[in-house]
Amino acid sequence: MSVRVVGYDFLGWVAADGAAPVGTCFQVEPGVLVTAHHVLVDIGAAAVGCVVRVGPVGGGAGWNATVQRVDEVHDLAVLRAEQPLSGSVSQVVVSDGVRDNEAVTTAGYPTVEDDGHEYALLTAGGHWRGPALRDGVLWSRLQADAVMPGMSGAPVLRTSDRAVVGVVSGRYNSQDGWLAGAVWVSRVEDLSALLDGVASVIVEETVPANGLLDMVLTVSQSQVRLSGCGQDVTATHRGVSSGLANALQDVRRERARRRVVVRDLAAGGQAAGVVSLRRAGELLAESFLPVTVAQALARVIRRAQREHVPVRVGVQAPDWWWLPWEALPEPVTGRPMVLHELVSVYRRVEAAGSRSAVVPGPLRIVVAIASPESGSGPLLDYERELGSVLDAVHGAHRSRAVVRIVPFATTAAIRAVLDEDTTHVLHLSAHGAPGILHLEDEQGRARSVDPETLIAEAIPEGRMPRVISLAACYTDADGEDGAGSFAARLARRGAGAVIATQTSVTDVYATRLFAAVYAELAASVRPDVVAAVAQARRRVQRDLATGPDPLTQAVAGMDEWSVVSVLAAAPSVTVVDGTAPAEPRAEIVPDLGGLLARPVGQFVGRRHAQRTLPGLLNDGTGTAVLLHGIGGVGKTTLAAEVVRRLLDTSPDWRLVTVTGPVTVDGLLTAVADAARRELVLRAQFSGPPMVAVQAASRVDLPWSDRFALLRDQVLAGTRILVVLDNFEDNLIRDSGIDAGWSVGDPGLAGLLAAWLTSPGRSRLLITSRYRFGLPDPAAERLHPYQVPPLSLAETRKLLWSLPRLDRHAADLGAQRRIWQTVGGHPRALEYLDALLPGTDGDPAGQGRFADITRRLRQAVETRLGAAGTAAWLAQQRTLDAALADTVTLAADDVLLTEHLTRLDTIEGAVRLLAGISVYREPIDINGLLFQIGIPNPDADREQQPGGRAEAARQIRDLLSRYALDLNELAQALGQDTPLTPADRERLARLLQQARQLHQPPFTAPPGMTGLVRQLATTSLIAVVDDDRMVMHRWTATELHRHWNTAHGPHHRPGLVTAAHHAAATYWRWRVETWPQKPVDDLHDLNETRHHLLATNDLETAGTITEHICSQLDQWGAWDRETSLIHDTLRWLPKNSPRRPAWYHQLGIIAQYRGDYAEAERRYQQSLTI
């Protein structure tokens, strides 16, 4: 007869063949048993290879087991049984970690003499008494009265969680009563060494001070096992039911149909519950948490609640990886387990051996954003993604984490940054698909990368980041090759932890989740990423669900906590050792032959230029590159970055840098000096190349002969890059209405023309405020690139490297104010940083870099003279005061008044300049026509307004047949379009027809192209992609001051107001005529409102505001609506009849949010006006 003993199915007996049991054994994993060595000695089977009989304490026939390992000194032995016992111990901890006087229990097979009775199991309670050194051997000891003969080899269980803390060796017996009840215990530390290579038992090296409860849910093809914390339960599961399969399919189909990104939710307002995995989680529990397993899990959770200790549940389900284990409900209350305040769920991955280690802080996060410029599938919006990443790492940055953004998401670029320093977190933002990540190649094309390629190419040996965050879709979904998910394969190859997603996830959820995770990692002394993700899940879901905005509530209803997974080999993964001294990190400034360069990693923006210009110079397709743009926009630092990248790619380039005014002789001599050094290194002290080098410095020879010698004898075989920095010092303005700039020295102009026409292997890189002309064919070989302002996202990144600005612009509101006043002008931002008060001992007037301090002092001396400079720089300024002073200094820096004086003489130039200045974003030719175009009264009849509406209607109808909307035009026309070829062609035709209809009711005035060119030559405007024009905000601010200042030399009354009025008309025309998305209409209306307010047309602005708020109210965007109403109330006159309606609307919004007291107050306020 056999009896099932609940909770002790890992216990067995040991006997000689055909004899009665003499000792106890216990199972650590199926088929592997542990006992005391002296038990085997007693039955004559103490040698490795001997065979003994073992069996369960509950009775039944036994079976053979072979002795695998013995440790006579520590009285331990390991057996391999022919068949396993029905259970295994759930947890093993080191003996030295057990607290003194801890309650323990011993259970074993006693061999006691009791007439008429037979015992097979006896338990004995006791207390731990710590270490004991006996005969030179370290033991542990416990105090217990009921440990009987036969219980040698029994496990000692910690009563609180039933973890094994030792193995019974023997009871101390003394005739005099000393040490009565003492039991000698073999230590787990010695058992662990004996088990090595026989069983993969995880031994906790220390017991966490917080009493962490670690559970593992192991799911095989047919069974599920829950082990840990004194529980070890195995049961048969039912597999995936049809209901579960259908629920998962419904969710995935709906998420794919909606392509859930946050901007799609903005116009929807529909319930998001149809994409929630809660129901699938409940069905998952019905299939994979049988009653016995659920009961064991419930016991642990109840204990955690009683003792208020955290629980970690590791899910190990390699055959069922694709199931949403994060959606499992916990069995006590039925709510999602990952949202329980004490539970952390992670996916347990058996790592081959971690290549990452805990290292000192501060926390270092490396970010790579994959935004290919071409390739199959949708392309990532780099600016939007950079903004989201900055939002995500903002909290960590404020906690002094180091955040490094890799300019390109190529494996080589990522490797270069990881190789510089230890990295704690690698954050990869990209498009993803099961098993692959879409990164970039060196040409900017999309490149599909599997995890093995990523590790081999991007992760230097010994520098595996502790955490890899995959901000991409489907990174934890199984790949088509059956090799596992992208994230799992990374974890198996040594990443400490990987944060990934099972499916798609909205931007708003991903940004908030990573922000919460990184803020926690940066703030903690020894942060644990598994705990950080668990806390972030709960906090983000709570904030979304309780937020007042229906849009965030809609995201909360999608339950995206269930699609984010964290993969690790252990329940706790410490990321940073905050107790260790921080590693010193020195800034690396490349030596580029005198060319001004910023420290490696601190260059911001200009991705397209960084990617294309080095290749243009390197591959022979370009002879010379001209970087031109307004002073301080970053031409020189961009040139330095281009040179650095060129040298990284091809170290055989030799660099020649010439700054400012240059002569023919000076340029040839500088090149000859570099060539001479190269020849000396090659030990070529004579011959034609050395003759050419020596001749280059002879001023008695014509420059054409000297250059011809250099070209034929040196440049033909040596790669020399000549950088001409600040080349505007060598230019003069041409005469005439379309006057541009040209090289003032005819000899220098001739040399450049000859050089560009026949450069050999040399190349030229030129920086200049102004674009200049050269005669053909040289002009065709000069590739111009106008350096644009930094975007808002890039400006935010630059602010981080400017210490005073970073401190004064901690919130996004202050950053936007800086952007609106100064814009993305690097030098102006650096001036602003230097003018702000610093910390103790850090005086105002000191820039981040020495060149900024020097330029700033020179600018102030030019305006005030040397005597007043020191006092002016030392002033204590607010941010607003520093902004005003920065704008003035920057205007002086770019010779703004001189340009205005000249433009005053060109008809229409100032009017066009004013028109461009009022637009807050890059504007196309249509926007310019509204400023200076000639009205075309026949335009409305020619464009057939009805045709516009019809084209828009047909486009919407066609998209709706495929469950698409105007947000998804790019996908509808892409390679993976769901449209049939015929419908795709029809859509393209309709769009072309619609665009043809969108011509403004103006025609271009004569000479408009020349006017635009004139403005561009001043560098006061920049021509950016798609031939759109933009002006730096600080330039616009200063220009408006000049035009609005009465009695000033450039006073133009009404000029700015008229430009704002024309801009408002332009934006309203777009809304009325263009078939665009509702969210784009709202954007254009908001711009219309801005310009109307600038003209003081409060009545029309109020009408536009009402329309905007009505749409926001329909979408449930109450935060934006409330902000807009408060802004409206600030400029409305006190006696305006519109005020009561706005107060009433604030009351309605408060009522929507459940704030009835505020609603009543606003209603009363609307009645008392």
Image: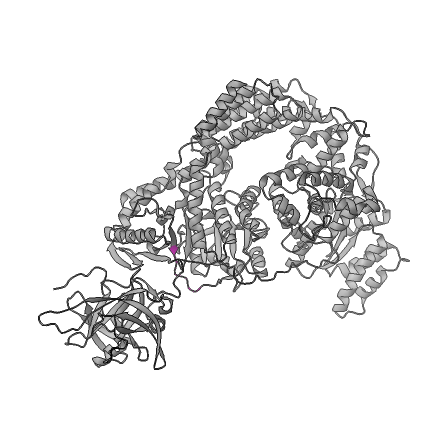
Quadrant in the rendering for residue 646? bottom right
Q: Position of residue 927 (x, y in %)?
A: 65, 29
* The C terminus - image quarter: top right
In the image, taking residue 841 as reference, residue 272 lies left or right, namely: left
Instruction: Indicate yes or no whether the magenta region holds residue 723.
Output: no
Q: Nearer the viewer, residue 818 or 918?
A: 818
* The N terminus - image quarter: bottom left
Q: Position of residue 103 (x, y in %)?
A: 30, 64
Quadrant in the rendering for residue 583? bottom right
| Any part of residue 694 in sight | yes
Q: Nearer the viewer, residue 1037 or 262?
A: 1037
Task: Please report the residue visible at 82 percent of the width from the left and 42 percent of the height from the top.
Answer: 864
Q: From this viewpoint, which residue is outermost toward the front? A: 176
Q: Is residue 297 above or below residue 1087?
A: below
Q: How is the image coloured?
A: one colour
Q: Nearer the viewer, residue 509 or 656?
A: 509
Q: From this viewpoint, which residue is outermost toward the right? A: 700
Q: Nearer the viewer, residue 445 or 435?
A: 435
In the image, taking residue 1162 as reference, residue 743 lies left or right, namely: right
Q: Position of residue 11 (x, y in %)?
A: 23, 66
**Magenta-colored span:** 347-353
Q: From this viewpoint, which residue is outermost toward the left? A: 116
What secondary structure is the stretch in magenta mostly built from?
Answer: loop
Q: Is residue 28 above or below residue 752?
A: below
Q: Position of residue 1125 (x, y in %)?
A: 55, 27
Tell how many labels.
0
Quadrant in the rendering for residue 481? bottom left
In the image, taking residue 495 as reference, residue 124 lies left or right, namely: left
Instruction: Indicate yes or no whether the magenta region holds residue 349.
Output: yes
Task: Please report the residue visible at 49 percent of the width from the left and 62 percent of the height from the top.
Answer: 358
In the image, taking residue 866 as reference, residue 130 lies left or right, namely: left
